[in-house]
Image (cartoon, rainbow, N blue to C red):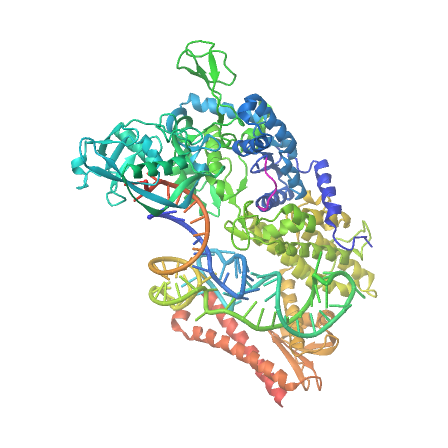
Amino acid sequence: MIELDSTYEHKSYEKKWYDYCVDHKLFHAPVDNTRKPFTILMPPPNVTSQLHMGHGLGYSIQDLFSRWQRMKGLNVCWLPGTDHAGIATQMMVEKDLEKEGTHRRAMGREKFFERLTSWKEKYGGMILDQFKTLGFSCDWERLAYTMDPKLSEAVRHVFVELYNEGLIYRGERLVNWDTVLQTAISDDEVESKEIQGILYFYRYPIDGSDEQIPIATTRPETMLGDTAVAVNAEDERFKHLLGKMVRLPFTNRLIPIIADDYVKSEFGTGAVKITPAHDPNDFEIGKRHNLPFINIMTVTGTMADNTPAPFKGQDRFVARKEVIKQMKALGLFDEEKSYKTTVPHSERSKTVIEPRLSLQWYVKMQELAKPAADAARSDELQFHPDLWKKTYLYWLDNIQDWCISRQLWWGHRIPIWYCNACPGVTTGMTDPTACQECGSKDIRQDEDVLDTWFSSWLWPLSPFNWPADDKKDEETLEYFNPTDVLVTAPEIIFLWVARMVMANLKFKNRLPFKHVYFNATVCDKQGRKFSKTLGNGIDPLDVIAKHGADAVRFTAISLAPLGGRVKMDVDDFDNGARFVNKIWNAARMVFQHLEPNQQLPRIQDLTLTLSEKWLIQRLRETSVKVDTHLVDYRVNDAVEEVYHFIWGAFCDWGLECAKIDLAAGAKPADKLRALSVLVYVFDGALRLAHPIMPFVTEELWQKMPAHPSWGPRPVSICVAAFPTAEMIPDFATDAAQWKTIQDIISGIRSVRSQMGLSPKQELPAHIRVDASLAAVVASASDWIQRLAKADKVISGVDVKRPGQSLTAVGQGFEVYLPVEGLIDVEKERIRLSTEEQRIKKILVGIASKLDNQSFVDRAPEDVLEQTRAQRANMEEQVSAIIRNLKALEA
RNA sequence: GGGGGCUUAGCUCAGUUGGUUAGAGCACCUGCCUUACAAGCAGGGGGUCACAGGUUCGAAUCCCGUAGCCCCCACCA
């Protein structure tokens, strides 16, 4: 026999087989133009991040696709890597500095950058080791990092190219200012939150008049930067005030009352204070009316020096209260109302965004967005599920220019040099030494760095040695790009997915991938997203330690429908563990009859039994279904198919039937035949399960003798052929016959169980069968005996009902179990008549359908035929039951 | 405010172009330690498919409306 531990000890096998595959370079894809590549990009996790269930799910799916395609013979490159994650990483180190009582500014840019680099070396990328514990088959030889020299070069190349084309420009605009991180952030890093705020009502005095104009605002402190009051031109209340000036309290500036359509008379007071430097709408109005822009806020969100005492230097929220206090003192305050409003917050620091006028670098997006949108419109680019297409298109069709400069130190520094002697700006692939306009050597580089996404949007290109230095680089890119499928979270459809599409189209004139699979968001049982702050997450490392990686992968994938959400609980992982255990035990059953490296006959050379043919047929069908489901990105369906095949078909029927031939006294030839079939099918089952559960399948497959019908055996199951219909014999007819035997067995079991017969009580089974089934049933008596606890089986077309019997009725057969004196006849009578009623009820429904002339006229032929056959079958069953009822009563 | 989605068994969810008696896993009930597995085996109960209309020979599936929940986008002071 083949030795096998009595339970699956994942810790003894996982690392062993992972290292084995890496050592054999099975996860590495060299450029090889004789083989078809399959490329899948790992969404690079932040260097700072730790493994969480979101990775557990999304990346398990990527590994599933990778392993499946690898087994189908493709040269699979699952490209791993990390993202330097500008803001997130800098925040982390800044927190450390704070604890040490220092600050990056005190440290200086260079030192701070060094500190970050060494921090990254030490702690960054821990997540990649965590990926290994889950068995992810990445091509580690191509590991990339967004700040690698080569990838940084790509960033610079793209910047320079876009700049030279005029697609990158510097502009003074209102940006989303994060007062905590002291940087601008892009629109896509802002999240709106509904907040219970206050709407304040106060008045501004009109210059040269006793009149006052009423104002409503949620942000009184911005009045210090007001440069107009706007009303609707049609508003009768204010018409006479148009063109007059307001004397702005505290600053005493005179500001005009203007008319603008933006103002809705019915809202608030109908008059709006205009602060062009601190509100997006006011900014637009300011531009329309040529108003001055007065920036009254510092980078930290305190009132700037151009504001009067007592506000100067106060935090914006303190100043808000102070303004109200002072307005009250001036007798200009009316009231405040509680007011629900949405306020933009920084995704990173969670602070309230301060719209602030500042000079930043932008990418013109419209031109880039158009082809990206067209690709989705024409379905050349497909989303799974496809409902994301609308979202994607809406964003692209309404795209805003992308603010790419960040006032941070961690990241790719903007390759722009300003001249101190002239307004000239210089850029290029190498650092310039002189201004390209005037030749002055007095130049300085822009202080800012680029948005992190400005490097990640090149992920389909830059890790593959783009831009190419030589022929080899060029080949690499051409081989792997375009990639095959992107698996990622819907949250970053704009931030990342759409931008990669734009970049690849712009620089390679083709899509980076044609399929995007959006995996589900992982939530707790209450449907709340897993989050650190809530502490409702499940740590995959804990679950792996408890159940093993295979159980985690299986559970995660089987819970995940396409898109949407997956509600997850720690206990769910018990299912995965149970399944792994089941596979392990099935192996123990088979292995105890095998010798290591035992020679087995080919399936093609054997005369197989009905149940064996059925089992092989099930393997064949399962292979097709699994493959089809994976092609359709229906990963949970694929997993379910494997699960039911192994548990329901292989274990519950295959192994149980085989026990007859494996029993101590069985004929050696039968035993060998049965073993050959079991090993053959189990090998196939392990192959089907391998992309989901790499470790248990590898351990068992390596121990199991090679089966000649699977052809030459490679070094690992991860490069063994994925089963297809062509590889497996077709036994469709035999399999259908075996289903009748299963019905007979299940029928007997059901009757026995319902009648409360002890499993120990053996009964003869008398089976009357239709002529067409007689031979098959006759040949199946061993199985019926064993699996239905019959001590004797008598079957044939004219088998008669023995005296007092229990009855099981099915399509084409009636089984009688003589129980003279063993059971309560009344009980059986009730059971049978209940069954009769149940079938009759269904029959009524079917009959009324067939009596309906419209149905008969309009239903398609196959539906009609089906319905008629069904009626015939039901009628037959009812009459059989009635016959037996009568016999029982006699 | 705009867009999208969801509502099916006690729980979590499948149900692909409308067509057999609506499925799975877990949970539950009954009986079994049958020498791979009690993390198991066998059997069983449980659903007017959110509600109200409509289209159709036929609707969980298509259309309209209602209610509840969720997500995304959005500059109403």
Q: Residue at x 40, y 36 (%)?
A: A318
In the image, the segment drawn in magenta is A48-53
Looking at the rendering, in which quadrant would you find the C terminus of chain A? bottom right
- Residue A632 visible to an observer of this rendering: no
Count of marks placed on residues: 0
Residue A149 lies, in percent from the top left, at: 58, 24
- Out of A807 and A160, give the one closest to the viewer: A160
Residue most extreme to the front: A329
> Position of A729 compared to A520: left or right?
right
> Position of A274 compared to A832: left or right?
left
> Position of A311 compared to A603: left or right?
left
Q: Residue at x 19, y 39 (%)?
A: A238
Residue A477 lies, in percent from the top left, at: 56, 29
- Out of A365 and A202, give the one closest to the viewer: A202
Residue A825 magenta = no
Residue most extreme to the left: A240
- Residue A760 visible to an observer of this rendering: yes
- Is A455 above or below relative to A333? above
Q: Based on the displayed image, in which of its 4 quarters is residue A320 positioned? A: top left
- Is A885 above or below relative to A232? below
Residue A450 lies, in percent from the top left, at: 49, 27
Q: Based on the displayed image, in which of its 4 quarters is residue A208 positioned? A: top left
Looking at the rendering, in which quadrant would you find the N terminus of chain A? bottom right
Residue A770 lies, in percent from the top left, at: 62, 75
Residue A52 magenta = yes
- Is A889 above or below relative to A710? below
Kindly report the secondary structure that dominates the magenta region of the rendered protein. Answer: loop
- Out of A737 and A758, give the one closest to the viewer: A758
Q: Based on the displayed image, in which of its 4 quarters is residue A352 positioned? A: top left
Q: Residue at x 54, y 41 (%)?
A: A485
> Position of A18 compared to A145: left or right?
right
